[in-house]
Amino acid sequence: MKLIVMAGRNVFRHTRRSVITALAISVGLTAMIAMDTLMNGADKMGMRNIVEFETGQLEIFAKGYYREEGAFPLDTVIKQPDSLAAIVRKIPGVKAVTGRLKFPSRLSNGVDELPVIGIGIDLQSEKTVFETPRAVIAGAFLDGPDQVLIGAELAGDLKVKVDDILTVLVRDRNGTYNAFDLEVRGLLITGHPLLDRNAVLMDLETARNLMAMPGRITELCVMTADNPKRIAAIKTEILSRIGPGYEIYAWDELNAAIFRIMGIKRFFGFLVGLAVLIIAAIGIINTMLMAVMERVPEIGTLKALGFSNRAIIMMFLYEGGLIGAIGSAVGTFFGLMISIYLSTVGLDFSRKLGGADFNIPMKMVFRGEINPATVLLVFAFGVAVSVLVTLLPVRRAAKLEPADALRHV
């Protein structure tokens, strides 16, 4: 206890130096916590958008389709979707299913033409699996044929608005080129780049007519009602019921590459905070080095009074730990304040998205996600680094003989 009291007095005896060092630590920890919150929020939003707008929790394809999905193989499709959906709906744990037909297409406003992915959706069952209707921010959800939904960003690129006419151009499964003029029924903001920038949604029957694929779909999307941890068991049960002519994948299997990218982003985000903390650690070393050099005679006096090398080292370690604890507490506090703001209020990108040349009340808010375990780990990391780097300058000074230390100027 005596060593701790002495360490506290020494820290506050050089207030300015201690405060500067503690602030350097706090900046690094604030950056690490805020960055982790942003990355968690990005990961959660990405996962939610994938499940709620693109795949559902499980996706069923005809055997061999997924291997060539990027090429949109129109011969490897589900030919009897209604009977397949009826089987899947009866499986325990399945909440809802819906079919989709995806195909390559081009979208034209009469002047400009852009490549997009056409998506035919079942207007009734779509609402039970996906959140697409809630993402409509202008106009309304589809209610019949000859209508399309497009992302607000894509609408900005094509300079169209609700009630305008767009031409959808495709090459159907027979190699015939088709073009349908369809009305823009509504505009979407989902946060998913596929739907917001690169897709046109239409009634499933309209898509089938365009592609000359009556009664067919490319995928059956499944939403489960159980704990997400049971998805693997439900997947196995579905596969056993539907037979070998189909293949089924969970949403995370379908997006493995995206998760690898998320991991890379998280790693580099952590490196940013770590770099700041390393700079702070160098500051601690300099602070403690100056403190040790200035107090070599004091160390000699303490050794002459009977203090052991270990006691002197511990006293300096307490000093470094105290500075680290103060800096870590301040950094954790501000990191939490920023994280709470990011997770409750969020970052509003409405102005950025509102730069399109049509007047729409867009709203796109990004929210972070606080990880309490990371906050505690970062605090402990800051204190540990402060203590460890203090060892470097103090061990050498503690080995001086009392007489040599007392003569030191």
Image: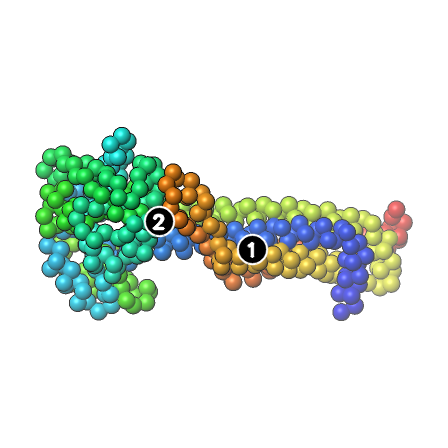
Q: What residue is disc 2 on?
A: 189
Query: In screen coordinates, is 338 left or right of 139?
Result: right
**Residue located at (14% from left, 49% from top):** 205
Nearest to the observer: residue 123 or residue 60: 123
**Residue located at (50% from left, 47% from top):** 269
Question: Is residue 211 shown above or below 54?
Answer: above
Q: Is residue 236 visible?
A: no
Labels 1, 2: front one? 2
CA–CA distance in space, label 1 to label 2: 26 Å
The x, y position of residue 19, in whole percent, is: 73, 53
Q: Which mark is residue 14?
A: none
Nearest to the observer: residue 394 or residue 375: 375
Query: In screen coordinates, is 258 left or right of 206?
Result: right
- Could you tell which of marks 1 and 2 lies nearer the N-terminus? 2
The x, y position of residue 284, in whole percent, is: 70, 50
Q: Secondary structure at mark 2?
A: loop
Other residues around mark 1 within 10 Å, as few (<14) / some (14–19) / many (≥20): some
Query: In screen coordinates, is 318 left or right of 189?
Result: right
| Disc 1 and disc 2 in contact, CB within 8 angstroms | no
Question: Is residue 260 shown above or below 309?
Answer: above
Nearest to the observer: residue 167 or residue 365: 167
Tally the marks. Answer: 2
Mark 2: amino acid: Ile
The x, y position of residue 54, in whole percent, is: 29, 51
Other residues around mark 2 within 10 Å, as few (<14) / some (14–19) / many (≥20): many
Q: Is residue 306 visible?
A: yes
Check the picture and name the quadrant holding the N terminus.
bottom right
The x, y position of residue 47, in whole percent, is: 36, 54
**Residue located at (60% from left, 56% from top):** 334
Name which quarter of the figure residue 3 lies in: bottom right
Q: Which mark is residue 338?
A: 1
**Residue located at (19% from left, 36% from top):** 169
